[in-house]
Image (tube, rainbow, N blue to C red):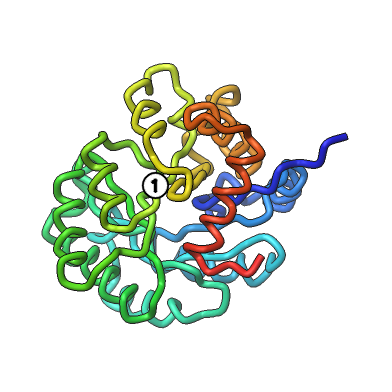
Amino acid sequence: MTAPLPLIDTHAHLDDEKFHDDLPAVLERARAAGVCRIVTVATTAPTSRISVDLAARHPDLLVATVGIQPNNVAQAAPGDWDEVVRLATAERVVALGETGLDRYWDFTPIPQQEDYFARHLELARRLKLPVVIHCRDAEADVVGMLRDDFDRHGPVRGVMHSFSGGMETAKACLEMGLYLSFAGMLTYKNAQALRAVAATVPLERLLVETDSPYLAPVPVRGKRNEPAFVVHTAACLAGLVGVDVAALAEQTTANARALFSLSS
């Protein structure tokens, strides 16, 4: 029997209540599928604390991020950013975020989102950590802020998570040094344009993720997503870039280890 391919799920929300009842089983299924690391990603100060705790309790599989997602910024309590800064140096924290901009929802005014995005970028530079970037219906805005950071400081160490942008955005992000990560939406019937973009990304700049519990890929679309399902997105991506799944797994795993400074 062929051993599972080693893959890293670079973006999952394991703090989500949908995993409260069976997280140990979820993690065991991930291991069985060949997932060797999962980045559990925070969206608020409280979920930052939870993510750090989860990574501490499952050190063989999990690493964590800390940050405040743009849609959650308006609800942040006065001391929440200070808590993120404090947690950013905790053991097993490998990145800041998710951060970025979102014009699809209107939970947080754009100036507030921009303020917190800038804070994450500055803190990432200071601590030499990568950033996990959320972008929804805000490509020009996100690229503009990243370009400003790039022009002042040089390459941006980070990842455009669950990438859904166009060719122009992809090219700009790659030029600034970012990785592009693809989630389950890549496999959807109506995602032809996204697949066309993915096919142009250099193999050494690709990552895969689930964004669990959201965006379950075909053939498990409609189910609660979980890290084990990253294998389906990896298979789709391999076909798009013209390599076999083993080569795609090897390269994306190496990419994730480089970006997040993972020793194994």
Q: In this view, does 195 lie to the left or right of 237?
A: left
- Count of numbered tags: 1
Badge 1 local density, few (<14 within 10 Å), some, or many (20+)?
A: many
Q: Where is residue 199 drawn, in percent x and y?
A: 41, 31
Q: Where is residue 50 drawn, in percent x and y?
A: 53, 66
Q: Is residue 227 left or right of residue 70?
A: right
Task: Decide: is 241 above or below 41.
Answer: above
Residue at the image position 26 percent from the left and 35 percent from the top: 167
Q: Which residue lies furthest to the top in this view?
A: 189
Circle 1 SS class: strand
Residue at the image position 38 percent from the left and 74 percent from the top: 84
- Say what amino acid the circle numbered 1 marks: Leu
Q: Is residue 250 left or right of residue 108?
A: right
Task: Decide: is 156 above or below 85.
Answer: above
Residue at the image position 52 percent from the left and 52 percent from the top: 10
- Towards the viewer: 51 or 135: 135
Q: Which residue lies furthest to the right in this view?
A: 1
Q: Where is residue 137 drawn, in percent x and y?
A: 21, 39
- Towards the viewer: 261 or 11: 261
Residue at the image position 58 percent from the left and 40 percent from the top: 248
Residue annotated with mark 1:
180
- Towards the viewer: 123 or 27: 123
Residue 234: name its quadrant.
top right
Q: In which quadrant will I find the C terminus?
A: bottom right
Q: Is residue 139 left or right of residue 2?
A: left
Task: Decide: is 259 above or below 196.
Answer: below
Q: Where is residue 251 drawn, in percent x and y?
A: 57, 48
- Towards the viewer: 171 or 79: 171
